[in-house]
Image: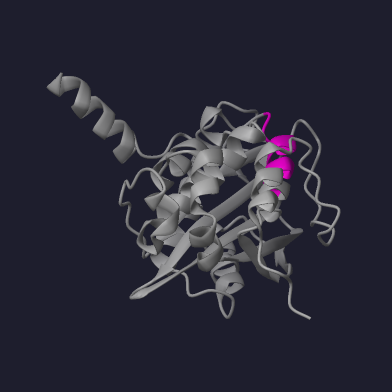
Amino acid sequence: MAESAPKTEDYTRWATDHTHHASHLPESPPIPHDSNTLLVSQPFTQNVKATCATGVSLFNDPRNHPDAVGTILTYAAKQTNFCPSEGLAGQIEQFHKYITKVSTFPGFMLTFDKPTSHEITTDNLTLMIDDIIRAYEGVVDADITKIVSSIEAMANSIINSSSSGAGPVLFTQMTIMGNSGDPSLLLTIFYTTLQMKVSTSGKKTIASPQSYTIHRKVFEVLTASLVANAEALFKLLGNGTFEEWLKRVTSGGGPKLSCLEERHLDAKKET
C-alpha cells in the first residue's frame, strides 16, 4: 500500500520539531560520537541552476526547486547547528542530527540506503578515489570530475588543517542532482570515516591498512508535494538558495556570496 502524500501539518511538524528524532525510519548507519573526530564536508551540485526566486514561487514552480531544496537543507543545518564552514572540529554530533533532520523531511523520499565496504592497503589517495567513484556507479549518474574535485578538496582540508593529524576523520559528500530537461531532483549523502596518521616525514596521510565503509543515502525530491504545499513551505522556511547551503556546509567555506546576498548588496547600492 502506497504512503499517503505529505500534508501541510506534516511540514509544519517537521519545521517546528527540535528533537531531530526519527523513530519511524530504519536505524541510521553509525556515526562516530567521539568528540575528537574531525569532519570535513565538500558538497557539490550537478545539472542545477540558481534562479534566486523568492516568495511562494520558490516552491510552487519546479524550475526553482534546486533553490527550494537548498533552502530546506539550510534550514535543517541551522536547526541542528551543523556548520562545517566554521571548522573541522565539533561537527560530529551536529552531523548526526542533521542527517536525521534531512531524512525526516516529508518532501524527501529515501530511495537508496546501502553501505559498501572497502579496504585500504596503501596511503595512495588515488585508490580511495577509485573506491568512491565505484560507490556511485549504479546508484546515481554522478559527474566523476566533480567527485574527484570534491575528494581532493576534502583531503587538502585535512592535510592543511592545524589539527594534530592523527585520529579519525569523517568525510562527507552531499549533492543536489538535476536531470537535463526534467524537473525531478535527487539529494545524495555519502560519508565514510577514515583513520588518519602522521608519517615519519611529518605529513598527514591516510593510515593503512584499514577497512572502511562508505554509507550511501539517496533521496528523491517529491516535486508535486512541494508545489502543493508551496504557501505553507514559504511561510515556514522563507527564501533561500542552494548557494547558501553550499556556503554553510563546505569546509573552508563555499561561494563567497549567494545570489540573494548579491541582490541585497545591489539594492543597498541603488539606495
Residue 189 at what x, y percent from top left?
A: 61, 57
**Residue ID at (64%, 49%):** 11
The answer, for residue 154, to whether it is visible in the render is no
Residue 251 at what x, y percent from top left?
A: 51, 38
The quarter of the displayed image where residue 253 is located: top left
Q: Quadrant of the N terminus?
A: bottom right
Residue 153 at what x, y percent from top left?
A: 46, 47
Q: Residue furthest left?
A: 270
Up/down of 68 relative to 250, above or below:
below
**Residue ID at (74%, 35%):** 18
Q: Nearer the viewer, residue 218 or 251?
A: 218
Up/down of 64 relative to 73, above or below:
below
Residue 257 at what x, y percent from top left?
A: 32, 34
Please give left or right for residue 271 compared with residue 228 in the image: left
Q: Residue furthest top?
A: 271
The colour style of the image is one colour
Q: Residue 18 in magenta?
A: no
Looking at the rendering, the stretch of residues picked out in magenta corresponds to 90-99
Q: Residue 95 in magenta?
A: yes
Please give left or right for residue 271 compared with residue 81 in the image: left
Q: Main secondary structure of the magenta part?
A: helix
Tag count:
0
Q: Nearer the viewer, residue 10 or 166?
A: 10
Q: Nearer the viewer, residue 222 or 257?
A: 222
Q: Quadrant of the C terminus?
A: top left
The answer, for residue 239, to whether it is visible in the render is yes
Please give left or right for residue 32 compared with residue 173 in the image: right
**Residue ID at (57%, 71%):** 136
**Residue ID at (43%, 57%):** 60
